[in-house]
Amino acid sequence: MDSQDLDGQFDILHQKVTAHQIFINIWEMVDKLYYRGFIVDYIIMDRASTNCTFTSMLFTGDPKEGYTIMNMYDASHSICITHLMYILKKLFCNLESSK
């Protein structure tokens, strides 16, 4: 089985960390996983203020317009940054409106 066929979840837990530290740690992890043959397709974060600041560092415009960024280690691959509760809320609203 190719490593690209594996589904994996890696939790990164921090306390009292800045958005800049998250930025450095996330890209270090993406680089190390990419080096070992894994491709990061998406990152899910909660809406903590530090995470929101980190997310806004990645986008030039309104992040809600795309929620994708270019992988700085592989320009041909984008990474989706999202907030799980936002996805669930959108799904719920769409299900409710389809009744």
Image (spheres, rainbow, N blue to C red):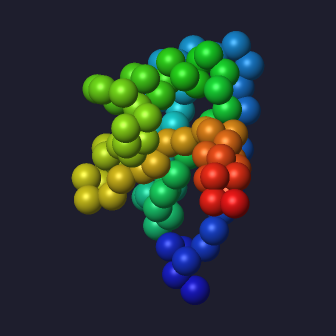
Front residue of this view, candidates 32 and 22: 22
Q: Is residue 70 left or right of residue 54?
A: left
Left/right placement of residue 12 relative to residue 26 reads right
Is residue 44 in view? Answer: no
Q: Residue 9 or 96: which is nearer the viewer? A: 96
Residue at screen point 37% across, 38% down: 65
Which residue is at a point 53% across and 32% down the rendered structure image? 25
Residue 31: % across, % down: 43, 48
For the point 70% across and 13% down, the residue is 16
Q: Looking at the image, which residue sits at the far left?
A: 75
How far across and how far down the image is residue 37, in percent? 46, 67
Residue 1 in view, yes or no: yes
Side of 78 where 6 appears, left or right: right
Q: Position of residue 19 (x, y in %)?
A: 53, 18
User: Above or below — where is 83 with respect to 3?
Assistant: above
**Relative vertical location of residue 14 with respect to residue 87 in this rendering, above or below:** above
Instruction: Quadrant for the C terminus, please.
Output: bottom right
Q: Which quadrant is the N terminus positioned in?
A: bottom right
Q: Is residue 92 above or below residue 86?
A: below
Farthest-out residue, front: 99
Q: Position of residue 75 (x, y in %)?
A: 25, 52
